[in-house]
Image: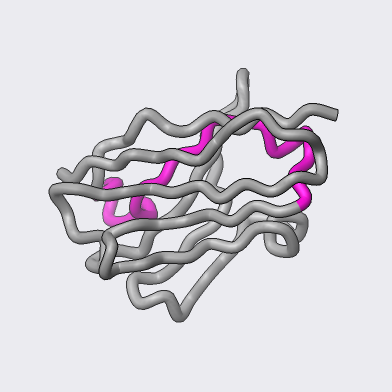
Amino acid sequence: QGQLDESGGGLVQAGSSLRLSCAASGRNISDYNMAWYRQAPGKEREIVASISWGGANINYATYSVKHRFTIIRDNAKNTLYLKMNSLEPGDAAMYYCNSEYQNGTYYCNWGPGTQVTVST
């Protein structure tokens, strides 16, 4: 399975923007539908956004995320991005990327994640 390395998180004020990156190695992400996930303390990991292998189909988990976040993939760079605008305290979580859950599996090993903290 491929390896993933998330980066770009940080401590920001509410209303700020961040761009998360997910660099893949050992596996070509262009073969898979990919997604961003997040996990807040005490909560289950949840999907945030997904993008099909060619980029034509994009889905966001909630109305709020849909109108503030943008998922982008650059298959040539084997990298997935998540542009987050107008961050809210409720967006604070550890963010991860991986393939979509398909056929009973994720196609990459989970990376370390990148922490997003939003202050009021």
Query: Residue drawn 44% across and 39% down?
Result: 7
Residue 70 position, x and y percent, is: 60, 63
Residue span colored magenta: 86-107
Residue farthest toward the right in the current orientation of the protein: 120
Residue 78 position, x and y percent, is: 27, 60
Query: Residue drawn 63% across and 56% down?
Result: 61
Quarter where residue 109 is shown = top left
Q: Quadrant of the N terminus?
A: top left
Of residues 62 and 73, which is closer to you in this image? 73
Q: How is the image coloured?
A: one colour
Residue farthest toward the bottom in the current orientation of the protein: 56
The verdict on residue 83 being magenta is: no
Query: Residue drawn 45% across and 80% down?
Result: 56
Vertical side of 55 occupied by 16: above or below: above
> How many marks do you count on the picture?
0
The verdict on residue 89 being magenta is: yes
Left or right side of 23 for 116: right
Query: Residue drawn 78% across and 50% down?
Result: 86
Quarter where residue 11 is shown = top right
Q: Quadrant of the C terminus?
A: top right
Vertical side of 21 occupied by 117: above or below: above
Residue 74 position, x and y percent, is: 36, 67
Vertical side of 17 occupied by 44: above or below: above
Residue 96 position, x and y percent, is: 45, 39
